[in-house]
Amino acid sequence: QVQLVESGGGSVQAGGSLNLSCAASGTMFGIVAMGWHRQAHGKQRDLVATITSGGSTNYADSVKGRFTISRDNAKNTAYLLMNSLKPEDTAVYYCTARNIWGTFFWGQGTQVTVSS
């Protein structure tokens, strides 16, 4: 099992920045990627960004150029730097980890609220 704990959420005005962190613990053997998903109120949960153990990244089109995902393998921690935030970025952000068998692990989520 893998436990994921997010931090860094909060409220910010449009154009501002937030930096989310995700600390992973437990059985990290076989974890090949970490990432972030988000779910706005009343909407489905969507992928935001992922990063593999080798450092390859992938972003949703809506956040490209504004968000940057990174990870510190030694600390088992992933980050999501969010710049130029928009009201439509308001959501609960979930950290994820995926192992080589395709199993996903989820954090409890952290709220991000962007006001106009």
Image (tube, grey):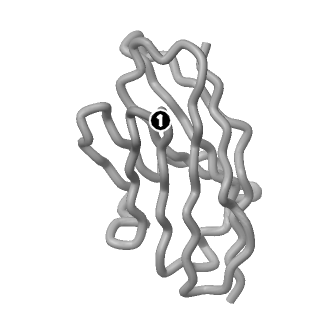
User: What amino acid is at disc 1?
Assistant: Lys
Label 1 residue SS: loop
> Image point 38% across, 50% down: which residue?
70
- The residue lying furthest to the front in this view is 74
Counting from the top left corner in percent of width and height, residue 84 is at 48, 81
Counting from the top left corner in percent of width and height, residue 86 is at 57, 79
**Res 91 quadrant in image:** bottom right
Compared to residue 67, the image places residue 104 above or below, namely above
Counting from the top left corner in percent of width and height, residue 44 is at 63, 48
Left or right for 66, reference 104: left
Compared to residue 30, the image places residue 20 above or below, namely below
Q: Nearer the viewer, residue 74 or 89?
A: 74
Counting from the top left corner in percent of width and height, residue 60 is at 39, 56
> Image point 73% across, 67% down: which residue?
10
Residue for badge 1: 75
**Res 107 quadrant in image:** top right
